[in-house]
Image (spheres, helix red, strand yellow):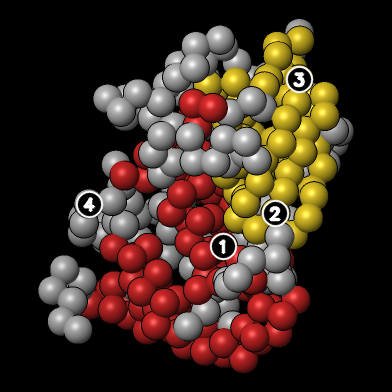
Amino acid sequence: MDRKHFDAEHLAFAEAFRAFADKQLVPHYLDWERAGITPREVFAEAGRSGFLGMQVPEEYGGGGTDDFRFNQALNEQIADAGITGSGLGLSLHNDTCLPYFLTFCNDEQKQRWLPGIAAGELITAVAMTEPGAGSDLSGIRTSARRDGDHYVVNGAKTFITNGINADLVITVVRTGEDRHKGLSLLIVERGTDGFERGRNLDKLGLHSQDTAELSFSDARVPWPTCSARRAPVSRSSPRSCRRSGCPSRSRGSPRPAPRSTRHCGTSRTARHSAPASGRSRTPSSCLRS
């Protein structure tokens, strides 16, 4: 296929990821399908090789480009290599979850979370779907009640991609009575008291996608927390929860990659062929106790 909107950097990035996938992912993919989950180390390897967090600023260990064509190039190679189950976990991490952190986090939260997200050491998920609501977000029942400097979260989610592996879960919760406007987003971290993983769901296909049930029983989430704000589901709102990838839409139009990009393209080809050892690491303080 003639990719007229890709330049040499995007094609080199796609070729580098395909080489990475053929070596690190394809030989093990059927084993992961049988196991029903992709190992966490896959995210760490992808992060070390430069295939996560392309939009993360360089100061946090990312690629420093808002050119979504790199994401597209990676996703095309995932499909072409036939590793969609595992690949969807990487795509969700890069394309759907990351923009929320870039858009809504304050400086302290960016310093605490973005290096780990870019390195693949903090895996992300978005928890919207519920057992009784399906894709109708206005019908969700998971609630968050303010209690001092915490929100107390109760409820359940299902069909959550990266649900077992996730360290940071963007969770849609009800904080108000209005069916459409009384919704907010909270980051629930691995290890939060009252936050539990349920079954890793057995589906008809894409078993390695890691699709899980989550439950919250008086889970206490510190305030302020990333994205803890009202998120109306009105179609007219650019932050609509109805469109789960809404922050990423603003980064979806093709733009030339900046010359300073360290992460993507031909200037980084050597890195993709041999993972760098100097990648930023997540400080221990990134996960709250």
Please state the horizontal and vertical placement of residue 62, each as a whole percent of the image: 49, 56
Q: Report the residue marked by disc 4.
A: 253
Q: Relative to 36, does residue 254 appear above or below in the rendering?
A: above
Residue drawn at x 73%, y 44% as measured from the top left:
214
| Disc 4 to disc 2, C-alpha distance | 32 Å
| Disc 4 to disc 1, C-alpha distance | 22 Å
Amino acid beneath label 1: Gly
Please state the horizontal and vertical placement of residue 183, each as a whole percent of the image: 53, 21
From this viewpoint, is residue 270 visible?
Answer: no
Q: Secondary structure at mark 3?
A: strand
Q: Report the residue marked by disc 3.
A: 152
Amino acid beneath label 2: Ala
Please state which of the two labelled residues, at mark 3 or mark 4, is closer to the viewer.
3
Please state which of the two labelled residues, at mark 4 or mark 1, is closer to the viewer.
1
Q: Quadrant of residue 261?
A: bottom left
Q: Secondary structure at mark 4?
A: loop
| Disc 2 to disc 1, C-alpha distance | 12 Å
Q: Using a 10 Å C-alpha cutoff, classify the residue at mark 1 as few (fewer than 14 neighbours), some (14 to 19) or many (20 or more).
A: many
Q: Report the residue marked by disc 2.
A: 212
Number of disc labels = 4
Residue 208 numbered tag: none
